[in-house]
Amino acid sequence: MKRQPKRNLIGRIVVGAVIAASSVMLADAQPAGETNKQTAKQAYEPGLGEFMTATQARHAKLWFAGKNRNWALAAYEIDEIKEGLEDAARLHATHDGIPVAEMIKSILDPRVERLEKAVEAKNSARFVAAFDELTAGCNSCHTQAGKPFIRIQRPSEPPLGNQNFAPVK
């Protein structure tokens, strides 16, 4: 019977050591505040493909917003497209020798501006024309970048089944 207290003591020491070791490992694996968050943000840089995929999704959402005359959503999607293109141009000014930033500035920016004006005017006919111009601009950039197989078009179905594109009444 005298051995049992000793056994309990050894068991407690082992359990304590395991808990302490686990705590140290977990603490080391967890971000330690704002400094690690900044480091993580600096470490991740989306590739040009990620920007273009997000832009493609926004492009599709923009179409359905405009088609449904939801001008507030259309304006929002245009702002998101602009923001994404600005980030792409800043982070990937050139990509594989392709002047991405210059192409965005000269080909896409004027078309986005025309689209923005059509949305501000709440003019469906101008919206459709400007949307098609933007789409043609996307395809022009892809062709000039040596990727003519990436062809953007008017979407046939909403990209997200859980979003209502009708304007708020």
Image (cartoon, rainbow, N blue to C red):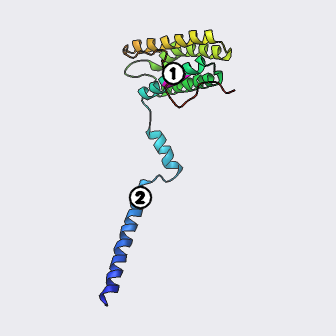
The residue under the point 39% across, 15% down is 145
Q: Nearer the viewer, residue 167 or 14?
A: 167
Q: Amino acid at mark 2?
A: Leu
Residue bearing the label numbered 1 = 60
The extreme bottom residue here reads 2
Spot occupied by residue 24 in the image (x, y as percentages of width and height)? 41, 62
Spot occupied by residue 31 in the image (x, y as percentages of width and height)? 47, 52
For the residue carrying disc 1, how many other residues have a C-alpha within 10 Å: few (<14), some (14-19), or many (20+)?
many
Distance between mark 1 and mark 2 Cα atoms: 42 Å
- Quick check: is 100 in the magenta stretch? no
Dominant SS of magenta comes to: helix
Q: Nearer the viewer, residue 38 or 78?
A: 78
What residue range appears in magenta? Answer: 57-61
Q: Quadrant of the C terminus?
A: top right
Q: Secondary structure at mark 1?
A: helix
Q: Are marks 1 and 2 in contact (CB under 8 Å)?
A: no
99 to 9, vertically: above or below: above
Spot occupied by residue 75 in the image (x, y as percentages of width and height)? 62, 22
- Quick check: is 60 in the magenta stretch? yes
Q: Is residue 130 left or right of residue 95?
A: right
Q: Secondary structure at mark 2?
A: helix
